[in-house]
Amino acid sequence: MKVLGLSLIMVSLLLTLSTAPASPAESNAKAQSLLERGVAMLKKGDLDEAEANLRRSTELNGTNAVALYYLGSVLMAERRFGEARDAFGKALSLNAEKPALGRKQWREAEDSTGLAEAFLGNFEAARKVYARAIAQDPAYPGFSYNLACVCAREGDRECALAMLRKAIDSDASSGLDPMLPDPSVDEDLKGLLGDPVFQAILISNVGPQPNDGPAGAMVRRGAALLASGEYAAAVLSEKNAIAKDPKNALAWFYLGGVMQKEHEKAMAAQAFEKALEYNLPPALPLTKQMVRFAAVVAATERMAEGDAKGATPLLLTAVKAAPFHPVAHYYLAEAYALQGMEDKAAVQLARAFELKENLTAVDKPLRDPASDKAFNAFKKDAEWKKLVASLKDK
C-alpha cells in the first residue's frame, strides 16, 4: 500500500509539473513568435493563417498593441468590420497608455477604425474617430479626406466640401508627392462632381499650365477664393478673367458658383448659361457633370420666372450630358408639363423614377409628383393618375 501511495503521489507530481503554466517571459516570447509568423502570412496574403497566428498571439499577450493592430488589418481585409474596429480600438487604447505603434501604424489604425465605422453605417461614430485623429495630427491629409467621404455618404455636402479642401490643401503643402486618391473618380464623392465648389477645390493648388491663355491664372485664383469662402474677391478675380477672355467657360462657371453662394440666383443662372454657351470644341473645358449642374441651375431659374419653354433646351443639354442622373429628367418633365405636353412629361417623369437609385446622399430627393404644382393640369387625367400611383413603388 505504501508503494502504491508513493506511486500515486509521484504521478500527481509529474502531472502537476507537466501542466504548469508557462512563465510570463515564455508566453511573451511565444506571442512574439506567433506575431512574426502572422505578419509574414499577412504579407503573403494568407489571411486565414495570419488570423490564426495573430489571435493566438493576442491570447498569450493581450497588451501587445502591435499584434492587435495587425489582427485588425487582417479583419479589415476580410471585411469583418465590427471585429476590425474592436481590434484597432484596443490597439489604440493600449498605445495611448504605452506607445508601441509607429506613426504610420497609428495613422492606419485610426483611419481603419473610421472606415470600419463608416462601412457599418455608423457615420456619426466615424466622424468622431476622424475628428479625434485630426486633432492629434492635423497636417495628415488622409484623415480629412476620409472624413470628407464619410460626410458625403451621410449627405452632409458642406462638411464634405470643407474636409476635402482641408485634405487637398494639406497634401499640397506637405512638400511630398501627392498621397491622396483622385477625388473625381471616388465613388463616395460622385454626388459632388458638378458642384462649382468641388471643382474649384480640385484646381485651387494647380500651378501655371501650358494652355492657360490670357486668363488661366485669374480663373484659378478665383476658384481658390471660391473654395476658401472669399466670395467678394472670387467675383472680382473671375470678372477680371472674363474681361481678359470673354468666352472663358470656366471663368463663367466659377462666377456662377460664387453667385450661388451669394444667393444671387438670377445672376448665377446667367453666368451658368454663358458657361454653357462658351463650352465649345475642341477644348470643352466643362466636364459632363459640370454641364449638367450648370444647365439644371439655369433651367430651374427660367422656370421660376415662368419661362418653361426657355428651360427646355437647357434641360435637354443636362440630360444629354448625364443621361443616368434622374434630376434633369424630373425637371424636364416639369418643363414639358408647364407647356401642356403631357406625353413628353410622362416619359421624362417615368425615366426620372427609373433612375432614382442613382441619387447619392448629397442629392436632394425627387419631389412627390402627386403634390408638385407643375403637374396640376394633369391631376384629373386617368392615365396620369395611374402613372403617378405606379411611381410610389419605385
Image (cartoon, rainbow, N blue to C red):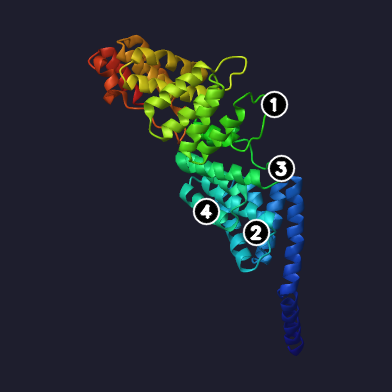
Q: How many marks?
A: 4
Q: CA distance from mark 3 to mark 2?
A: 30 Å
Residue depth check, mark 4 versus mark 1: number of the one nearer the observer = 1
For the residues bearing labels 3 and 2, Cβ distance under 8 angstroms: no
Q: CA distance from mark 4 to mark 1?
A: 39 Å
Instruction: State which quadrant residue 66 falls in.
Output: bottom right
Residue depth check, mark 2 versus mark 1: number of the one nearer the observer = 1
Q: CA distance from mark 2 to mark 1?
A: 50 Å
Question: Which residue is identified by label 4?
Answer: 131
Residue depth check, mark 4 versus mark 2: number of the one nearer the observer = 4
Q: Which mark is residue 177?
A: 3
Q: Is residue 10 above or below residue 180?
A: below
Instruction: Identify the secondary structure beneath mark 3.
Output: loop
- One can see residue 317 in this view: yes
Counting residues from the start of the chain, the first of labels 4 and 2 encountered is 2
Q: Which mark is residue 68?
A: 2
Instruction: Identify the secondary structure beneath mark 2.
Output: helix
Nearest to the observer: residue 155 or residue 313: 313
Residue depth check, mark 1 versus mark 3: number of the one nearer the observer = 1
The residue under label 4 is which amino acid type? Ala
Instruction: Identify the secondary structure beneath mark 1.
Output: loop
Q: x, y percentage for residue 14? A: 76, 78
Q: x, y percentage for residue 125? A: 48, 52
Please report the residue visible at 56 percent of the width from the left and 23 percent of the height from the top. 244
The residue under label 3 is which amino acid type? Asp
